[in-house]
Image: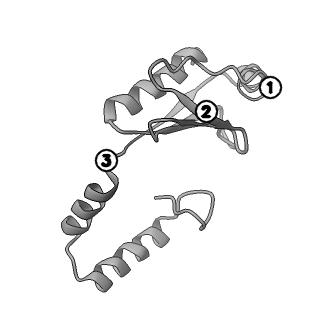
């Protein structure tokens, strides 16, 4: 779980602490809290993939992604904006997003995607894989 305003990454201990606090303060069951969150914000599904590539391809992939900014045509998913702050994050008009970044320790292109349905999240990840031929 990533928490806005905390750190720019996942922190399971912090997330678990927030969850325990939420249960203690509200007195609700986890299922009740989840139902309330879904009712207010809707559903979102996450897909996460780590695509391996030959180490000698890294320079080419970095050129395509970070210099040429050669993103795939996402078809039905209209792009709202793109940030190149840490890798590449594409924000879609439907509220979904995809992050594409290189691992700092191994030849992997990491892709994280959140979309309204599981199949949409998987499809966007597949588009990235196909587009960069990895």
Residue 80 lies, in percent from the top left, at 58, 34
Secondary structure under the numbered disc 3 in the rendered image: loop
Which of labels 3 and 2 is toward the front? 3
Q: Give the spatial CA distance, label 3 vs label 1.
A: 34 Å
Quadrant containing the C terminus in the rendered view: top right
Q: Nearer the viewer, residue 46 or 59?
A: 46
Asked if residue 112 lies left or right of residue 88, the reply is left
* Residue under label 3: 43
Secondary structure under the numbered disc 1 in the rendered image: helix
Position of residue 36 relative to residue 22, above or below, is above
* Residue under label 2: 108
Categorize mark 3 by other alpha carbons within 10 Å: few (<14), some (14-19), many (20+). few
Categorize mark 2 by other alpha carbons within 10 Å: few (<14), some (14-19), many (20+). some
Name which of mark 3 and mark 1 comes first in the sequence: 3
Point 61% across, 18% down: residue: 132
Write down the quadrant of residue 19 in the picture. bottom left
Categorize mark 1 by other alpha carbons within 10 Å: few (<14), some (14-19), many (20+). few
Residues at marks 1 and 2 touching, judged by CB atoms closer than 8 Å? no
Residue 92 lies, in percent from the top left, at 52, 35
Q: Nearer the viewer, residue 26 or 108?
A: 26
């Amino acid at each position: 779980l990533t928490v806005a305003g905390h750190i720019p990454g996942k922190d399971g201990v912090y997330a678990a602490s927030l969850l325990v606090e939420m249960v203690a303060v509200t007195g609700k069951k986890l299922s009740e809290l989840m139902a309330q969150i879904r009712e207010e914000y809707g559903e979102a599904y996450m897909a996460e993939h780590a695509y391996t590539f030959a180490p000698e391809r890294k320079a080419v992939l970095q050129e395509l992604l970070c210099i040429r900014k050669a993103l795939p045509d996402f078809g039905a998913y209209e792009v709202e904006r793109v940030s190149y702050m840490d890798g590449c994050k594409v924000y879609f008009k439907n509220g979904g997003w995809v992050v594409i970044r290189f691992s700092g320790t191994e030849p992997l292109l990491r892709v994280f995607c959140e979309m309204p349905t599981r199949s949409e999240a998987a499809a966007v990840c597949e588009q990235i894989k196909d587009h960069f031929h990895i």
